[in-house]
Image (cartoon, rainbow, N blue to C red):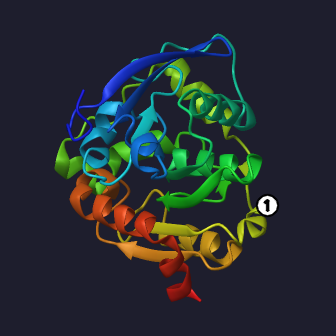
């Protein structure tokens, strides 16, 4: 399939007893031109289809994402998993694709997982984009709260495609999770924090916490509420692309 196509290549990866559906836009571009591939980690219960309009517009690199267990095209996990385990699963897939160094963009629950990967696999992540997320996951059911988000009501987007067990395991994986003690160790990692100005699920104060803990992080408040990466896909994809093209410039601007 052509790298410039808006349609991804879909595969199923079997990792540690899990069968995970993976989508790759511009497959092979990073190997061909030396660009750093981007991994996108979605919010709780959200699948590849929800992310597709955003990811198809991120240019200049291979972009990939996956359905978590019990979400979209990935069947339920047989047993619960923790954040370190699912982080290791994701990086095993990156290894299979030949991605030794990656950029990561994470939204909401996926933003917490992005932090976990950056902390757990130092040196493997070149830059980090955190959207509508937090360094402390202490709100069970936060994925369901997005259903009542202003953007969700207005857009008609179908975000939740998870099974009840899939939601339960995703919630349990982050129950009581916090990255706060470890984020200062990411001070050399270029980081962009994007928060929605009307987000009632993850208020902008969480972005302030992230930026205060990651020295040099760029924090921006953007139009929209919790689902801004999807409802404002063109603007957010352009901002992500610009940051990944020159992450060092963003850090200098924040200094």
The residue at 23%/32% (across/down) is 2
Which percent across, then down, holds residue 121?
A: 73, 46
The residue at 81%/62% (across/down) is 181
Which percent across, then down, holds residue 148?
A: 33, 47
The one nearer the camera, 41 or 97, is 97
- 17 left or right of 68? right
Q: In this view, does 214 lie above or below 33?
A: below
* Residue 107 in view, yes or no: no
Which percent across, then down, holds residue 107?
A: 47, 51
* Residue 244 in view, yes or no: yes
* Extreme-front residue of the structure: 32
Q: In which quarter of the image is residue 210?
A: bottom right
Which percent across, then down, holds residue 9?
A: 32, 26
Q: Name the residue under label 1.
A: 182
- 151 left or right of 222? left
The residue at 46%/59% (across/down) is 131
- 156 left or right of 65? left
**Classed neighbour count for the residue bearing mark 1: other residues with Cα under 10 Å, few (<14), some (14–19), many (≥20):** some
The one nearer the camera, 2 or 206, is 2
Q: In this view, does 80 lie above or below 121?
A: above
The one nearer the camera, 200 or 14, is 14
Q: Is mark 1 on a helix, strand or loop?
A: loop
């Amino acid at each position: 399939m052509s790298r410039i196509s808006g349609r991804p290549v879909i595969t199923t990866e079997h990792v540690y007893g899990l069968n995970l559906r993976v989508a790759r836009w511009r497959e092979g571009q990073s190997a061909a031109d030396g660009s750093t591939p981007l991994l996108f980690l979605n919010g709780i219960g959200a699948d590849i289809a929800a992310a597709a309009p955003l990811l198809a517009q991120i240019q200049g690199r291979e972009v990939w994402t996956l359905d978590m267990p019990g979400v979209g095209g990935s069947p339920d996990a047989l047993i619960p998993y923790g954040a370190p385990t699912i982080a290791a699963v994701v990086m095993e897939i990156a290894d299979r694709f030949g991605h030794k160094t990656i950029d990561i963009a994470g939204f909401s629950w996926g933003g917490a997982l992005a932090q976990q990967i950056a902390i757990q696999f130092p040196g493997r992540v070149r830059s980090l984009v955190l959207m509508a997320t937090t360094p402390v996951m202490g709100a069970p059911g936060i994925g369901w709260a997005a259903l009542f988000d202003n953007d969700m009501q207005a857009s008609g987007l179908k975000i939740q495609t998870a099974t009840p067990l899939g939601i339960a395991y995703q919630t349990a994986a982050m129950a009581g999770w916090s990255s706060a003690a470890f984020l200062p160790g990411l001070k050399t990692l270029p980081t962009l924090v994007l928060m929605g100005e009307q987000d009632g699920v993850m208020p902008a104060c969480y972005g302030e916490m992230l930026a205060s803990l990651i020295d040099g992080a760029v924090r921006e408040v953007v139009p929209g509420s919790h689902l801004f990466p999807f409802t404002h896909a063109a603007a957010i994809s352009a901002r992500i692309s610009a940051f990944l093209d020159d992450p060092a410039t963003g850090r200098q601007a924040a200094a």
